[in-house]
């Protein structure tokens, strides 16, 4: 696990020192790679590649990056892990290749030499890779299938740059710090910025499952090597088949165990984030029951009961016999972490669960260097409430006055706990198109965006989640939602949250449920294997019941979040008032203070139903104070 950066300046005229600037870019990422650092400069082409290393595999100097092949023709910097590298290494050795290290980076080099970019079909892992091919004078960037590892690039006025985080670009003297209208719009609409956009103009995120080639003439070509939409198309092949449920569960079990075990490949200690939910419990149970060593598990709890699942995580840990660590997130920890969020997330990022994620990462890092999480289960097994609610709405399987209807019971719960969400659900019924419904349920600032942002920063078009393949419009609507979440929300919110929160303390996070072998098996399955009348994750729960008593996990879904509304109105109020002051907002000059004040006053008068608005405003101004001043 590492952080990477580099550039290729096609218009370089000696106006800055190549080595010095590359080092500045590299060391801005030191938090994610404290163990080692390295540069490669090709002066005649004004090209540089850099790496900050977090040593996980082959802890010796032989794992140093940038790494070269035996003829110095291929140079690689790499962030991530190729979990099946030993298997690929054996195949390459049988073809005559000799290895100096026991690192997966060296396997990438010779796999590329032997098979070219076709080697990507063999890799099982998470990765952001930069390859300099001296033979062709081409720079190649590659991002893993699901976008677990981040990879940004910048191209303007003949300067091409890449990096794991955008902060590296700000170290280059030619970088123009301009706000992207698209990125700004997306942040206030959804709370995160999805690819290809970023918060900066001319900075883009490489799409998951893609590679990008820059040639010696400064031409860029992008291609996909793996496409989740193609995986979902297999639904049409199997939807009318008679599938044996027991056989499906057995096959799923074998795929999960194999994929989970691969994530234990490491030369340093490995632990698991155990929330007490279905996904992390499945990862923990299948691993603990199939390996001999005692797993280290970590749970974060809250003192506020309605946000706390730690007691369930503790019971599951006790049942499985793990070495369990439990910590609680108090307002004091939140107050300490909140002002640091713009340092951890160098783009505006509105998911408040970043706070407990960072806290539990910090605690876990004291005992392990690698952690497994349960991310991806909701998107692929149907875990979010909105999926089965929407299915009920579409199939008209409910009555609002029928007290035994699961949807009716959910509405009663929301009416009491979260009236804003019930308002959204009820409006959802009236919207016509599937895309409209999805965009609405996921949005924060809608029609009032024009009031919020000053004219110079307005983006006048809409950006929707769009499925590229016409055939996918024939998928069941709920599957379209799941696919869209998996393509955008999962990599750009969930995985971004975990990656930055953990790498800020040099902790490597791995996502066992996102192995592409699992996704190719689960994603196309018909909805009856994902939903019951009450909830999602049907097939996963059936499997988990073989390992853990149902009473330990069969309960209403509990999201991972903080008491955001309560903390903003009490302990965080002074900080909110300071950050959203007239002087501060006007100094940055992007938002209209009049409307910011209107939202703020409405929130503190208990009139604002959508409390995400105040949080997004607060987070954006925090970020702007750090990166725009």
Image (cartoon, rainbow, N blue to C red):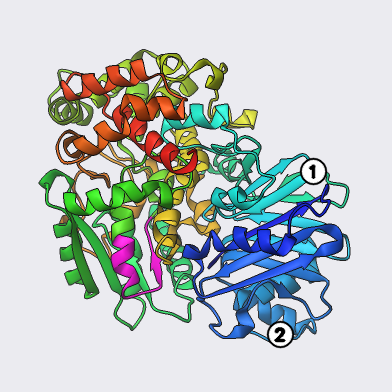
Q: Position of residue 483 (x, y in %)?
A: 50, 38
Q: Secondary structure at mark 1?
A: loop
Residue 99 is marked as: 2
Examine the structure image and report whether residue 361 is included in the region drawn in magenta: yes
Q: CA distance from mark 1 to mark 2?
A: 37 Å
Which numbered mark, 1 or 2, is in the foreground of this view?
1
Question: Would you place residue 285 above or below residue 247 in this image?
Answer: below
In the rendered image of this protein, does residue 87 appear above or below residue 112?
below
Note whether 174 is above or below 50 in the view shown.
above
Q: Position of residue 20 (x, y in %)?
A: 67, 63
Left or right for 272, reference 194 = left
- In this rendered view, identify the residue nearer to me: 162 or 233: 162
Side of 344 where 72 appears, left or right: right
Which residue shows up at 48% across the image and 42% down it? 627
Q: Residue at x 14, y 37 (%)?
A: 570
Q: Which residue is mark 1?
A: 158
Label 2 secondary element? loop
Q: Residue at x 83, y 71 (%)?
A: 73
Instruction: Give the image location of residue 499, x and y in percent.
Output: 45, 56
Question: Tag 1: Cα neighbours inside 10 Å, few (<14), some, or many (≥20)?
Answer: few
Q: Is residue 252 magenta?
A: no
Residue 534 location, quadrant: top left
Neighbour tally class for label 2: few under 14, some 14-19, many 20 plus, Cα within 10 Å: some
N-terminal label among 1 and 2: 2
- Expressed as whole percent of the image width and height from the top left, the position of residue 600 reads 26, 23
Q: Is residue 351 above or below residue 495?
A: above
Span shown in magenta: 360-374
Residue 608 can be seen in this image: no
């Amino acid at each position: 696990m590492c952080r990477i950066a580099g550039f290729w300046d096609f218009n370089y005229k000696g106006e800055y020192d190549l080595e010095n600037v590359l080092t500045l870019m590299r060391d801005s990422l030191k938090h994610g790679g404290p163990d080692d650092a390295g540069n490669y400069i090709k002066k005649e082409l004004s090209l540089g590649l850099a790496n900050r290393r977090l040593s996980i595999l082959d802890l010796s100097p032989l794992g140093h990056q940038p790494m070269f092949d035996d003829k110095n023709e291929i140079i690689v910097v790499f962030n991530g892990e190729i979990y099946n590298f030993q298997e690929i290494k054996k195949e390459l050795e049988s073809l005559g290749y000799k290895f100096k290290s026991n690192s997966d980076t060296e396997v990438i080099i010779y796999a590329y030499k032997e098979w070219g970019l076709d080697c990507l079909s063999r890799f099982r892992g998470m990765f952001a890779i930069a390859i300099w091919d001296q033979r062709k004078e081409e720079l190649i960037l590659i991002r893993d299938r699901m976008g677990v590892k981040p990879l940004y690039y910048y191209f303007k006025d003949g300067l091409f740059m890449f990096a794991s985080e955008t902060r590296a670009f700000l170290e280059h003297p030619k970088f123009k710090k301009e706000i992207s209208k698209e990125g700004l719009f997306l942040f206030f609409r959804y709370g995160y910025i999805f690819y290809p956009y970023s918060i900066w103009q001319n900075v883009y995120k490489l799409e998951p499952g893609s590679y990008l080639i820059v040639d010696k003439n400064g031409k860029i070509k992008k291609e996909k090597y793996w496409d989740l939409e193609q995986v979902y198309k297999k639904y049409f092949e199997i939807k009318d088949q008679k599938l044996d449920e027991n056989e499906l569960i057995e096959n799923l079990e074998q795929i999960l165990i194999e994929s989970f075990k691969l994530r234990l490949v490491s030369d340093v200690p490995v632990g698991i984030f155990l929330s007490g939910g279905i996904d992390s419990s499945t990862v923990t149970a299948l691993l603990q029951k199939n390996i001999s060593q005692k797993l280290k598990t970590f749970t974060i709890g809250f003192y506020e009961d309605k946000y706390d699942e730690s007691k369930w995580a503790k019971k599951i840990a006790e049942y499985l016999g793990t070495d369990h660590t439990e910590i609680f997130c108090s307002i004091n920890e939140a107050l300490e972490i909140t002002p640091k969020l713009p340092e951890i997330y160098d783009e505006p990022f509105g998911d408040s669960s970043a706070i407990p994620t960072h806290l539990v990462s910090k605690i876990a890092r004291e005992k392990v260097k690698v952690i497994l999480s349960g991310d991806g289960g909701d998107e692929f097994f149907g875990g979010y409430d909105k999926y089965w609610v929407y299915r009920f709405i579409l199939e008209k399987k409910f009555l609002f006055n029928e007290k035994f209807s699961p949807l009716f019971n959910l509405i009663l719960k929301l009416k009491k706990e979260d009236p804003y969400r019930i308002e959204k659900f009820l409006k959802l019924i009236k919207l016509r198109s599937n895309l409209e419904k999805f965009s609405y349920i996921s949005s924060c600032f809608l029609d009032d965006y024009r009031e919020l942002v000053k004219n110079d920063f307005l983006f006048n078009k809409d950006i929707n989640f769009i499925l590229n393949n016409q055939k996918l419009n024939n998928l069941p609507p709920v599957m379209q939602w799941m696919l869209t979440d998996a393509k955008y929300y999962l990599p750009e919110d969930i995985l971004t949250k975990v990656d930055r929160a953990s790498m800020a303390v040099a902790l490597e996070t791995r996502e066992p449920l996102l192995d592409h072998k699992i996704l190719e098996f689960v994603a196309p399955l018909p909805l009856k294997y994902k939903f019951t009348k009450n909830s999602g994750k049907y097939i996963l729960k059936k499997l988990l019941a073989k390992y853990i008593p149902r009473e330990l996990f069969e309960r209403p879904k509990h999201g991972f979040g903080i008491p955001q509304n309560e903390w903003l109105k009490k302990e965080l109020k002074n900080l909110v008032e300071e950050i959203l002051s007239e002087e501060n907002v006007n100094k940055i000059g992007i938002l209209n203070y009049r409307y910011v004040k209107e939202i703020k006053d409405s929130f503190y008068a208990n009139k604002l139903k959508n409390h995400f608005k105040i949080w997004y405003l607060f987070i954006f101004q925090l970020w702007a104070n750090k990166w725009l001043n």
